[in-house]
């Protein structure tokens, strides 16, 4: 239930359970600030909850939600004059990226954006 007493559909809670962790980790990689990342993801999830019917009417709700997260992160970084931390620290985050690569790929594949890093031997 939301703070104003609105009951959210089970489909929202299933979405939240499935994607909150990967959204948070992606935000952490981009923002390099776990509390800020958590707040951004919570805000995105709240927005998605408030506009759930609209999101479900989209051709690809999952891809639309992922795009909203990415745009929100980009806007947050732009406001503070920063670039995504991930590009600056990619070498140090490789193990994390590898662990989440399949999840990121699944989220972005519908948009046709994710080529994924190549790992020797794969």
Image (cartoon, grey):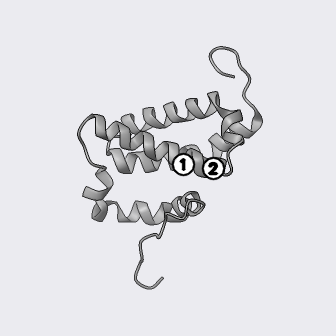
Residue under numbered circle 2: 62
| Vertical relation: 61 (above or below) 3 | below
Question: Which residue occupies 49% across, 60% down?
Answer: 100
How far apart marks 2 and 1 lie (CA) works out to: 6 Å
- Please tell me which residue lies in front, 121 or 9: 9
Direction from residue 25 to residue 61 in the image, left or right: right
Dot 2 alpha-carbon crowd within 10 angstroms: few under 14, some 14 to 19, many 20 or more: some
| Vertical relation: 5 (above or below) 37 | above
- Please tell me which residue lies in front, 48 or 92: 48
- Please tell me which residue lies in front, 114 or 12: 114
At which x and y percent is residue 41? 48, 37
Q: On the image, which quarter does residue 55 sit in?
A: top right
Question: Which residue occupies 69% across, 22% down?
Answer: 1
Q: Which mark is residue 66?
A: 1
Question: Which residue occupies 42% across, 77% down?
Answer: 118
Q: Residue 111 carries which label?
A: none
Check disc 2 and report its element: helix, strand or loop. Answer: helix
Q: Do tag 2 and tag 1 residues touch (Cβ < 8 Å)?
A: yes
At which x and y percent is residue 20? 56, 43
């Amino acid at each position: 239930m939301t703070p104003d007493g609105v009951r959210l559909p089970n489909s929202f809670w299933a979405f939240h359970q499935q994607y909150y962790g990967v959204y948070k980790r992606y935000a952490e990689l981009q923002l390099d600030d776990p509390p800020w990342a958590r707040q951004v993801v919570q805000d995105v999830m709240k927005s998605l909850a408030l506009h759930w019917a609209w999101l479900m009417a989209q051709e690809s709700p999952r891809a639309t939600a992922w795009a909203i997260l990415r745009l929100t992160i980009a806007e947050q970084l732009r406001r503070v004059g920063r670039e995504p931390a991930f590009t600056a620290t990619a070498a140090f985050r490789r193990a994390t990226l590898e662990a989440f690569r399949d999840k990121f790929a699944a989220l972005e594949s519908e948009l046709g954006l994710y080529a994924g890093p190549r790992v020797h031997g794969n």
